[in-house]
Image (spheres, helix red, strand yellow):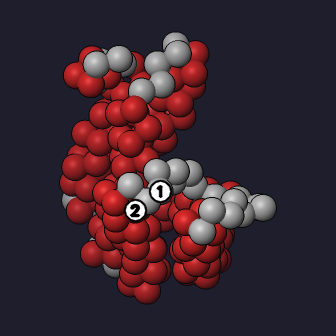
């Protein structure tokens, strides 16, 4: 499929919508309109789930979508961590660890891609679990502000501590997988 035509594929349109949601989500958080922020975050999550389903159902898997979808996901999550830290809803150390992990992976992937050394950047199971925990933690931060549930505070705090441990561990696992692939040895467990 020609590159420009890939932009019109339904899954890619949903991914682009997710990218367009980000500035409005930031505005809602900065203005302390947490119900609106929660609605936009849920809409972004639904669009993320639907774009993958549509790509399979409509046979519209595209090269653009393979790159655009993870970029949209990381941009959404990383931006939320930074904005939540700015408004004092997220501890700085968690944001620094998450952002450092993502930035490190992005830099390594870019260098390997640019040099042609490695083109396979599938996330590991541990990386997917880390991302899932980040999504649940961000959702718990918003839910706590919208619904003022006291019991969610302990869950949120536990999730943030777990993420603080998982982020560097998943970065180390990613580095290990890349080194093994570069040496021509496929890791046994991804």
Q: Position of residue 176 (x, y in %)?
A: 61, 74
Question: Is mark 1 in CB contact (under 8 Å) with mark 2?
Answer: yes
At 58% from the left and 16% from the top, the residue drawn is 57
Write down the quadrant of residue 75 in the picture.
bottom left
- Label 1 sits on residue: 118
Q: Secondary structure at mark 1?
A: loop
- Label 2 sits on residue: 112
* Mark 2 nearby-residue class (10 Å; few <14, some 14–19, many ≥20): some
At 57% from the left and 55% from the top, the residue drawn is 123
Q: Secondary structure at mark 2?
A: helix
Above/below status of 7 relative to 71 = above
Q: Nearer the viewer, residue 101 or 157?
A: 101
Q: Position of residue 48 (x, y in %)?
A: 48, 37
Above/below status of 151 relative to 72 = below
Residue furthest top as drawn: 58
Above/below status of 189 relative to 70 = below
* Mark 1 nearby-residue class (10 Å; few <14, some 14–19, many ≥20): some
At 27% from the left and 75% from the top, the residue drawn is 86
Sequence-wise first label, 1 or 2: 2
Query: Is residue 189 among what the camera can see?
Result: yes
């Amino acid at each position: 499929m020609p590159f420009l035509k890939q932009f019109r594929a339904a899954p890619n349109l949903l991914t682009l919508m997710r990218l367009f949601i980000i500035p409005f989500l930031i505005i809602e958080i900065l203005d302390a309109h947490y119900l609106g922020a929660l609605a936009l975050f849920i809409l972004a999550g639904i669009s993320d789930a639907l774009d993958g389903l549509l790509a399979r159902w409509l046979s519209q898997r595209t090269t653009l979508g393979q790159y655009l979808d993870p970029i949209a996901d990381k941009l959404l999550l990383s931006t939320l961590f930074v904005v939540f830290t700015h408004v004092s809803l997220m501890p700085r150390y968690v944001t620094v660890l998450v952002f450092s992990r993502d930035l490190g992976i992005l830099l390594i992937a870019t260098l390997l891609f640019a040099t042609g050394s490695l083109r396979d950047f599938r996330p590991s199971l541990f990386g997917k679990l880390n991302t899932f925990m980040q999504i649940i933690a961000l959702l718990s931060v918003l839910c706590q502000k919208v619904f003022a549930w006291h019991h969610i505070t302990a869950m949120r705090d536990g999730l943030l501590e777990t993420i603080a441990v998982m982020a560097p561990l998943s970065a180390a696992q990613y580095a290990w997988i890349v080194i093994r692939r570069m040496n021509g040895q496929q890791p046994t467990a991804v």
